[in-house]
Every structure is written in structure tokens, then in C-alpha cells.
Amino acid sequence: MPDTHRTSRSQRDGVREVEQHQPFDPFTRRALIAVAIGLAALALVAFVWYTSHMLLLAFGGILLAVFLRTLSDWLSAKTTLSEGWSLAVVGVALLLLLGLGGRLIAPRIGEQFTQLTQQLPQAWQQFRETIEQYSWGRQLLEQAQQPDQVASGTSGIFAQVGRVFSGTFDTIANIVIILFIGVYLAANPQLYTRGIIRLVPQHKRPRAREVLHVMGYTLRWWLLGRAIAMVAIGMMVTIGLSLLGIPLALPLGIIAALLDFVPNIGPIIAALPAVLLGLTQAPIQALYVVLLYLAIQMVEGYLLTPLVEQETVELPPALTIGAQVLLSVLLGPLGLVFATPLAAMALVLVKMLYIEDTLGDTIDVRGEQEAHEQEQAMAESA
């Protein structure tokens, strides 16, 4: 018994000694840990905020790399060329296509774009004079904030999107940065993938590889869908406006194709100059233009988009528009341009890391089964 008392007394003395050497009580320690986590989160948010422009350019490079690798992987699968030679052939072919296309149609397109920039202000002025004949039109113009600046493309979201595609120095610099990042990523994607995987704990790395595979799968199919839609929209707009007798149908079709990269909002912006030019001829022509664009968007919405979403993540329209508005306000024109693919990536992460891993629910994520099979094959070969 005395030995037992001495043992328990020594244990209590040891506990008191440990408590004396701890500068904070448990509640204070938990509070300090919570504060440290909060400060780290704020620091991360501040870092993302101040580097958002470069992060968006890097994401643009990732999109370009996925596009190049999709073409090169297809060529490598259809031929005996290695991945490196396939990528080189794809790069040379794209450069030749752009060079020949520019040489053949650039003068004509440049001349028509010059005419378009000259006619749009006249069309806007004619539109103002027309609606000023009505009381509701005069009230609308009085309540509008700086309509001339909106029409000439110097303010608002419409102007921001226009500046993205303008020939300014900043835009050229952004394109060059995206090209360099995209080419380097496409040349050796495994190097960067392994670097990202090493940031994850070892027991989580197989799942991290699956998530990265599904994200690449989603971006690949999203880009393929956008490319098909852009080409189809550009051709339909050009042909439709030509049949309606609207001048400068080719540059308007190119504008529609480029802005279709931004779903929902882009087509609305692309329709504005065509409607204005239709108004210069007759109000009924403007109505025909509106009906044409609506019909084309119905073809895209009910035919092209569902075909693509059979292979990739399905984005709810409300989520897409919300992401576009939020990122355009927070990050400017680049945020608007890349809002949809970023929303697709975020949806993949939510499905795989939160719904499946955290909540334990089963959900269909396209591309996940293929990623899981690849991970099992790697484990068996190791």
C-alpha cells in the first residue's frame, strides 16, 4: 500500500510539473490554433487576390496544354508516332493553319472589321434618334448611365469583354504568357503532375491522382465541346446574317464564335452589334436578327451542349451564370472568360472530395471509373 501511495503521488507530481511547463491552458491553446488557422486562411485569400491575374493566366495555359495534349494523344493513338513527335506535328500543323488562314483571309477580315468599327457608332446614333421619338425611349436614355461610353466599349462588363479581345499590349502580353505556359505544360505534363502529387500525404496520393485525372478529363471534353460549338455558331451566324442581307456578316460571325467561349453571356454580347446594324436597315430586320440568334442558341442549348455533357460534368445554368457574374466582378474580364471551366473544376472537386470522400455518398462522376482503373493498374504493376 505505501508503494501504491508513493506511485500515485509521484504521478500527480509529474502531471503538475507538466502543467507548470505548459504556458497555456487547453482552451487558450485551442483558441490560438483557431486564430492561426484563420490568419493562414486570410493570408491564402490575400495571396490569391493579389496574384489572381497570373493565376488566371496560368489556368489559361493549362487549358491550352489540355487542348494540345488532346490533339497529340489522338494523333499518337492513330499513328506510330511517340508523344513528343505527335505534339511537334500538332504544333507545326496549327502554326501552318494559322499562317495560311491569315494570309488568305486576313486582309478581307481586317477591312471588314474596320468597316464594322466605323458603322457601329453610326448605328448606335441612329438607334438613339429612333427611340428618342417616344417618351419611354427618352426616359430610358435619361436614366441610363453614360450610354455613349457603353456603346463605344469603354465601361462595364461588355466593354471588359471587348478589351479582352482587343489588340492592346496587355492582351498580347497575356496571350504570349498563356502560350509559353501551355507549351511547356503540354511538353512534359508528368513533371508538373508529380510535383502536385508530392504535396499530398502519401496515403492520399492515389486519390489525388484520380482527382487530377478526372479534372483533366473534364477540361478535355469541355474544350472539345466549346471548340465544336464555336465553329458551328460562327458558321451559322455568318450564313444566317448573309441570307438576311445584314452587312459585314463574316466579322460578326467571327465575333459570335469567339464570344461563344463564354456561355450565356457571350452570345448576348455578340448579338448586340448585329442587331444595331439590322436597325440601320429597318426595325423588322433587327427583329429577324434577334430571332436568328435565338434560334442558333436553341440549337446549341438543346443539341450541342447535351451531347458534350454526356461525356463531362453537367453545369447547371444558374451555377454557370452565378460564377460568371461573381468572377467578372472580382477578377475582371479574365475572370469572366475562365469562369465556366473554373466552375466545372470546382464542381468536380466538390463531388469527389466532399460528397464522396467526406460525406460517403455515391455519385456519378464521369471519368472517375477510368481514373480508378488506371490507379489500380499502376498499383499492380508496382
Image (cartoon, rainbow, N blue to C red):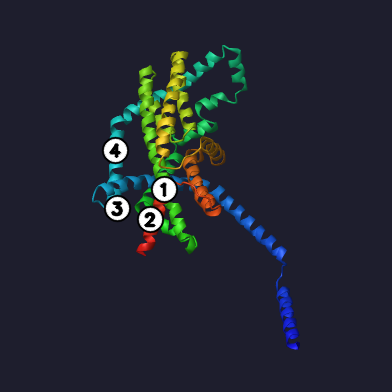
Cα gap from disc 3 to disc 2, whole angstroms: 22 Å
Whichever of callouts 3 and 4 sits on the residue coming sooner in the sequence is 3
Q: Nearer the viewer, mark 4 or mark 1?
A: 1
- Location of residue 305 in the rendering, given as x and y in whole percent from the top left corner: 42, 35
Left or right? Give the position of 234 relative to 1: left
* Residue named by callout 1: 367
Residue located beneath label 2 in the image: 374
Q: For the residues marked 3 and 4, what is the alpha-carbon distance in whole angstroms?
A: 20 Å
Q: Amino acid at mark 4?
A: Leu
Query: Which residue: 50% across, 16% down?
Result: 126
Q: Secondary structure at mark 4?
A: helix
Circle 2 Cα neighbour tier, 10 Å, few/some/many (<14 / 14–19 / ≥20): some
For the C terminus, give its image quadrant. bottom left
Residue 196 visible in the current orientation: no
Mark 2, secondary structure of its residue: helix
User: Would you name the residue on which mark 4 appears?
Assistant: 97
The mark that comes first in sequence, 1 or 3, is 3
Q: Could you say whether the residue bearing mark 1 is in a helix, strand or loop? A: loop
Task: Locate residue 60, reporting x and y percent.
Answer: 44, 44
Identify which amino acid the numbered label 3 is placed on: Gly
Label 3 secondary element: helix
Above/below status of 112 relative to 58: above
Q: Residue at x 44, y 52 (%)?
A: 212
Label 1 to label 2: alpha-carbon separation: 11 Å
Alpha-carbon distance for marks 2 and 4? 35 Å
Q: Is residue 104 left or right of residue 198?
A: left
Sequence-first disc among 3 and 2:
3
Upstream in sequence: badge 4 or badge 1: 4
Q: Is residue 188 visible?
A: yes
Looking at the picture, which amino acid does disc 1 mark?
A: Gly
Q: Quadrant of residue 1?
A: bottom right
